[in-house]
Image (cartoon, grey):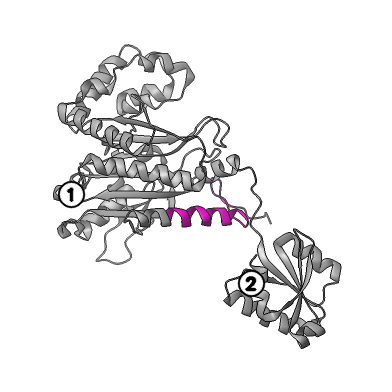
Amino acid sequence: MSTLKAVRGTRDLLPPETQLWNRVEATARAVFSRYGFGEIRTPIFEATELFARGVGEETDIVSKEMYTWEDRARAASEKAQSLTLRPENTAGVVRAYIEHKLGETGNLQKLFYIGPQFRRERPQRGRYRQFWQIGVEVLGPVSSGAESPIRDAEILEMLASLLDELGIKNWQLDLNSVGSSTDRPRYIAALREALAPVKHLMCEDNQRRAETNPLRVLDSKDPNDQELINALPKIADFLDAESTAHFAQVKAALDACGVPYNVNPRLVRGLDYYTRTTFEFTVPDGSGLGTQNALLGGGRYDGLSEMLGGPKAPGIGFAIGEDRLILTLQAQAAETEAAKLDAYIAPLGIAQNAAALALARELRRAGLSVEVGDGSFRMKKSFEAADKVARHIVLLGEDEVATGVLTIKTFATGEQAKVERSAATEHLAR
């Protein structure tokens, strides 16, 4: 019988790597909390219509990459329904905003999520069919200030702070405006006109995008098409006065905060719901992501709520590819060794096993991380096992149990000391 393995495009996350994942998520939660965000958890599958209407039927995500199935009716009173594993989370968050009438509070909704998404794309480094995202959405009625450029700038300043706190080095923020819901169609029409005489010279994917979603052509990384793409019209030339002023205010606020950025006229992001500010954070070559060096991206989506049948609710958000963030941290870190436990308790003989577990309980309740060995181990095996996982080894024999004086060795210094049990927590925490 063949050995069962994880499905292609998925994988198991194991210790010690999961310690890094937990640190990243804990840091994100702490930063988001300082900015007034609360967590939202939406289902991992939704009605297919949500993504078709929100993300766009002509996008690669909806047309090629979604995991969709027919959920058959189980009773005569039920109808069959097309369901899809979420390929992204913004549409689900906006659906929840509408369903739970969050706009009726009149307040700005500042929400974050951490969880898996699913796309059936070709697996490659940092890109999986089940992948994890850390994301933020800010939306609300116009009266809440949701449409203000200060919201865009605050999101970007928060992201800069988060990447700095995580230790991401040499990140770059690329920034652009894709204009309003009236600017964008004018620009797309100009793109189609400019692409018509040259699209036959492009790769197969770009020939298809030129027909179905011309904005996606600008995202193309095909080296043979770059000269043609660089000659296409720039969206900055199609912005109306309001969009131009909005973008200028975003940049001014970033300048005031000292957040560096680069205006990239080719940054458009191809999802149907984006308007005005779009952005992307990248890292340098050699940061673990190969040629695709985008770490995260996002933008404003002022019309998405109405597109999904809800009230007017301007919004802006982003999604971090957590898998790619972890790869970058690992590639940029000088040392990736897992953090060690505070102590390893080595009972000297099987008769001391119970006492060793009782001591471990005492130390753990005091906040220390502790592993317990086994009294059947030889001394050499106990030391070898302890050195792999802990900073200290605590030897627990009959004398230590009887006197309450523990023998503790610190591996980093080689120091061995006799320590009163009442002082063990302080000694092991050093």
Classify residue 301 by image quadrant. top left
Q: Which mark is residue 426?
A: 2
Residue 368, placed above or below residue 203: below
Does the rendering let one see residue 266?
yes
- How far apart in space, not on screen, are marks 1 and 2 (Cα)? 59 Å
In magenta, the rendered stretch is 6-29
User: Residue 197, how many percent across, how many down?
Assistant: 31, 11
Left or right, 291 with respect to 141, comes to right
Image quadrant where one finds the C terminus: bottom right
The residue carrying pointer 2 sits among few (fewer than 14), some (14 to 19) or many (20 or more) residues within 10 Å by Cα, namely: few
In the depicted view, which residue is nearer to us: 163 or 227? 163
Residue 7 covered by magenta stretch: yes
The residue at the point 39 percent across, 35 percent down is 280
Instruction: Identify residue type, mark 1.
Output: Gly
> Which numbered circle lies on residue 262?
none
The local secondary structure at tag 1 comes to loop
Q: Nearer the viewer, mark 1 or mark 2?
A: 2
Q: Which residue lies furthest to the bottom in this view?
A: 402
Residue 262 is one of the magenta-drawn residues = no
* Pointer 1 or 2: first along the chain: 1
Marking on residue 309: 1
Q: Quadrant of residue 253?
A: top left
